[in-house]
Image: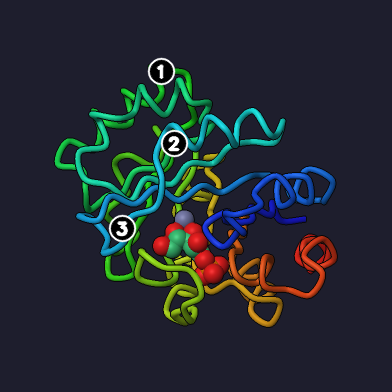
């Protein structure tokens, strides 16, 4: 069964408690929390202060996706806010190995996100040091975009790289995940499904989460 990580970017911010209650009672495994700085991506969302509230509202894993420049400046703040997994973008890190060591040194799991144009082969020398790869299946910045089909080839290539080395690294797919494409994503070798609009715009979000778990 895939890990299902609803993205709170698509939640109802005027009534977050209701969405947290729904997620807590659902089969969702993780909270996916998208942090955007208006520089690395053309949108601004929220930071550690809001994540602290999410942390208090749930016992589920807090999967924090940083779409920000200079993530090293904020890693500790996100750890204090309660992040369990901290993912930084390959494209935002000049000293990526140092970023990974920092995140792990703070006691969090370390993830690396790749934009759609960034090849998975670039992860060869850090794959053994990380817990997760987040493959962006849309250009980051906004929810509700269409899945980029080339992602399926990237998943297969990454799955081979991980299995060849006998590693245990999660493959998370972020962007445009729907009930229609989830099976092909899991069949290609991914095991974590992020879903924003598919969950929160569904007539019955709890049922949608169950359907994603069952694909
Ligand atoms: C996009 C974010 C995603 C987004 C996914 O920049 O990283 O996590 O919330 O939203 P959907 O599932 O609606 O594409
Ligand atoms: Zn995300």
Q: Which residue is mark 2?
A: 86
Element under disc 1: loop
In this view, 118 is above or below 76: below
Q: Are marks 1 and 3 in contact (CB under 8 Å)?
A: no
Q: Is residue 204 left or right of residue 179?
A: right
Element under disc 3: helix
> Few, some or many C-alpha atoms within 10 Å of disc 2 (few <14, some 14-19, many ≥20)?
many
Q: Earlier in the sequence, mark 2 or mark 3?
A: 2
Which quarter of the figure has residue 188? bottom right
Q: CA distance from mark 2 to mark 3?
A: 21 Å
Q: Are marks 1 and 2 in contact (CB under 8 Å)?
A: yes
Residue 191: x and y in percent read 63, 55
Residue 70: x and y in percent read 20, 38
Element under disc 2: strand
Work out which quarter of the rendered image holds the C terminus and state it. Answer: bottom right
Look at 27% across and 37% down and name the residue there.
71
Label 2 beta carbon within 8 A of ligand 2: no
């Amino acid at each position: 069964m895939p890990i299902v990580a609803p993205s709170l970017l698509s939640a109802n911010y005027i009534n977050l408690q209701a969405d947290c209650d729904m997620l807590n009672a659902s089969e969702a495994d993780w909270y996916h929390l998208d942090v955007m700085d208006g520089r690395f991506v053309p949108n601004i969302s929220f930071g550690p202060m809001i994540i602290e509230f999410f942390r208090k509202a749930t016992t589920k894993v807090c999967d924090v996706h940083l779409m920000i420049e200079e993530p090293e400046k904020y890693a500790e703040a996100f750890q204090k806010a309660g992040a369990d997994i901290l993912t930084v973008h390959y494209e935002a890190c000049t000293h990526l190995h140092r970023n990974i060591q920092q995140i792990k040194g703070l006691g969090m799991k370390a993830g690396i996100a790749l934009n759609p144009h960034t090849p998975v082969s670039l992860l060869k020398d850090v794959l053994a040091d990380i817990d997760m790869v987040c493959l962006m299946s849309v250009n980051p910045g906004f929810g509700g975009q269409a899945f980029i089909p080339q992602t399926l080839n990237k998943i297969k290539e990454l799955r081979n790289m991980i299995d060849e080395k006998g590693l245990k690294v999660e493959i998370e797919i972020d962007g445009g995940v729907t009930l229609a494409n989830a099976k092909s994503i899991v069949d290609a070798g991914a095991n974590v499904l992020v879903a924003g609009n598919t969950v929160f715009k569904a007539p019955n979000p709890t049922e949608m989460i169950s359907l994603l778990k069952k694909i």
